[in-house]
Amino acid sequence: MESEAITSALSDLYNFHKYQYDQLIKPRNIKYNSLTDDDKKLLPWYVEHTEIMKKCIDHNRECLQSIAYTVGANWGFPDPSIWDPPTTTGFDRVRSLLLQLTREWSDEGIDERQVLERIYGDLGSQQLDILIPGCGTGRIIYDLAARGHDVHGIEFGYHVMILNQFMLNFYQREFIIYPYLHKLSNVVSRDRQTRNVTIHKEVSDIKGSMAMSGGSFIDIYGPNDLQISEFYSEENHECRADPTKFDTLITCFFIDTAPNIIDYLRTIHHRLHPHGKWINIGPLQWHFEDDHNITTTITNGITVPSINKGLELSSEDLFHLINQFFKITRNDQIPTTYATDQTLMAKNLYHCLYWIASPLPLK
């Protein structure tokens, strides 16, 4: 099953150009061909712009196929012809990841990365062992390792892990992508939609170390007494027996991915040294609020139905819960966007929660 999930994710990157063509070019052609000749004369630029979009899609194809092939070969899957088929859900993830690459590794993401600079400054100058669940495409790991810290990241999805591995281990030179093609509303001008972005990694002397794990945060690092669920397996008992503790744990746009925030808090507490520090930045855009799929969990030794949604706490209720595990020593709000085209006429602005906390002794 794992190899099927990996190769399907690789296929999503490798075949993303087909999705882009179906989503962007086909509708434009159908619409244009349905117009009267008089209407077409009112849009003399339309056909040329469609051709420009085709060239952008083809360029994305070259980049994403190279990334998929490089990482796939390293992971033992060198032949795209036998990879599992792509999925519509996977294509949508790739679309989002192009924007995330832009946020983390391009000059257009500099303003959004200021929240990372806030974290870096609050770490101080001492070399630290740091754990970062939900580390994205790897920028935060790279920056902290360059500053001399020993950093371990973890990611759950194979799509983001592929890009993470490419940027951290296989990046050789800057490359260009077109991340904004799917932005169809609130666009100031069509050349904004088809502008390119240069992805580049500053060459740094890595004074610390970088390591990555793939899987569920609570499944790999949680204590051994959490409820069995699709995110926490009985089989991973030996992995969780690793006694490693960390000086600092950073959650960056991560805690709202929790189907059960209590499990996250127990796991964070479990993996910090008694005098360690938890730094959080992010909104409460709860990822499972629209997920009505019924799952199962084991409660008091009995398998019972559950659901991933249901614990979407307000910030007030979340802080009451956190205070049972941690002492919050700093609590601010930081306004920022996330993976957003800053030229759009409308943007989502998050008033992100930023806190620093230390673990309390558990009763």
Image (cartoon, helix red, strand yellow):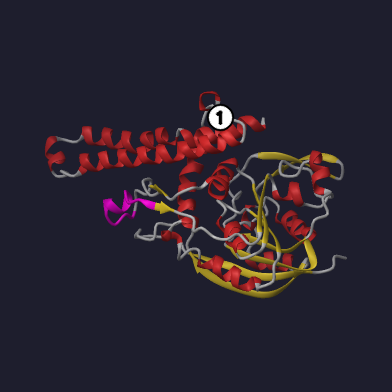
Q: Within the image, what quadrant is residue 232 found in?
A: top right
Q: Nearer the viewer, residue 32 or 164?
A: 164
Above/below status of 110 relative to 13? below
Residue 192 belongs to the span the image colors magenta: yes
Q: 346 or 317: nearer the eye?
A: 346
Residue bearing mark 1 = 78
User: Is residue 87 visible to us here?
Assistant: no
Q: Is residue 196 left or right of residue 169?
A: left
Q: Amino acid at mark 1?
A: Pro
How far across and down, in percent of the image, does residue 138 sit? 57, 53
Q: What span is colored magenta in the figure?
A: 186-197
For this rendering, which residue is in front, 232 or 35? 232
**Rendered residue at 49%/52% (across/down):** 100
Q: Is residue 104 left or right of residue 222?
A: left
Q: Is residue 67 magenta?
A: no
**x, y percent for residue 193:** 32, 50
